[in-house]
Image: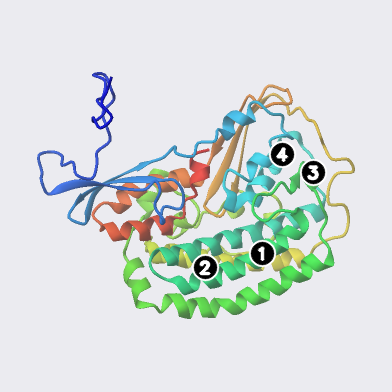
Amino acid sequence: MTPRNASPTLPVNAPPQAPTLVQAHDGDDETYYLNMGPQHPSMHGVLRLLLKLRGEKILKCDPVIGYAHRAHEKMAENRNYVQFYPNTSRIDYLSGMIYNIAYCQMIEKVCSYEVPERAVAIRIIACELNRIQSHLLWLGTYLMDIGGITPFLYCFDDREEILGILDRITGSRLTYAYGRFGGVTRDVDDVFLSQATEFLARLRGRFPMYKKLVEGNVIFRKRSIGVGVIDKDMAMRYGVTGPCLRAAGIAYDVRKAEPYGGYEEYDFDVPTREAGDCLARYEVRVAEMEQSCRIIEQAIAKLPEGAFGPKKFIKKLKPPVGEFYFACESARGSFGMYLVSDGSDTPVKLKLRTPSFANLSSMPEALEGTMVADTIAVLGSVDVVMPEIDR
């Protein structure tokens, strides 16, 4: 019987233990390992970064994932297509509306379902509002990570307005099941449209304040200019997409490159920067919020009368046999769904290509040679959402 205070002994064949804070490696007494996460206030989820350091300089970074695995892909194989609705917005809870609508758009494309013009416009309004609130949450938390408390309060104040507007038509503030095959669950009314219009005017009035509060701050500039550079070559090698890719100078946006869901009928720009650093990623996302405002205004102006869904909502379907792929532009980048169908009402396979996984993969190279304090700034600027990595 083992004494109560005795140290536990490992079996002879036990797997090697992960390096701890005090372990030195390679016979170099100047290097050591530091665990950052998985429970760290700046991790943006349960991510563990194993840092190999010399002093405060990062020699190597190993991201460790899997702490929140929820098996969405396996659940898709055990549910019919309609039952998978609620899962979609929980893959990336900050792009929940975009993911939910994209799932419907994939099935509609596979099954050749028609979507009423009014429903197409409503979806675009809802998705772009969802994109703005995601960027606002990112902006507030990113600045708070590097010491800016005041912008966080303003960002969440604006984000709260969007959550209330979307709650009016969806009944939810964060995870949505608003999309239905062939349309949406509920029509929008004049109150919703007026609230959305008033919010856009309010947000545009806030942009100069954000610029003055953030971009002129010497601490922010010192911690973002030239830090965590992800250049074009690195972005292409790791499959980086979204604002991180556009901050490296590549103007790729699925809404423009492979138009879907009616985006080809809207006039908007794809903001880019060349530096590829933390500041460039900040500037791209702020510029994207302005473009989302443009898209929403156009959608409200051209919102047609008519049906917001099929005459009878589809409760059961059997897509044709085959393999299909559909991609959309989420707040973090290209989100793709690879569907394998055997003609039944349940997928054989639904493989999800989430942008955060590829974007996070670039972190070890981006962090090499930087300082420990830069880790928080770089990770925050990349904007990963762990639930879509641990899907």
Residue 248 visible, this orientation: no
The residue identified by callout 3 is: 182
The residue identified by callout 2 is: 286
Q: Is residue 172 above or below residue 20?
A: below
* Of marks 1 and 2, the one in the foreground: 1
Where disc 1 sits, the SS reads helix
Q: Which residue is drawn at 27% across and 23% down?
A: 2
Residue 28 visible, this orientation: yes
Where disc 4 sits, the SS reads helix
Could you tell which of marks 4 and 2 lies nearer the N-terminus?
A: 4
Type of amino acid at the residue the image marks with label 1: Ile
The residue identified by callout 4 is: 109
Q: Nearer the viewer, residue 154 or 357?
A: 154
Could you tell which of marks 3 and 1 lies nearer the N-terminus?
A: 1
The residue identified by callout 1 is: 162
Could you tell which of marks 1 and 4 lies nearer the N-terminus?
A: 4
Q: In this view, does 290 lie above or below 351?
A: below
* Of marks 3 and 1, the one in the foreground: 1
Task: Say left or right for 161 vs 35.
Answer: right
- Horizontal and vertical percent position of residue 367: 30, 53
- Horizontal and vertical percent position of residue 126: 70, 57
Q: Is residue 78 above or below residue 52?
A: above
Task: Say left or right for 344 vs 290.
Answer: right
Could you tell which of marks 3 and 4 lies nearer the N-terminus?
A: 4
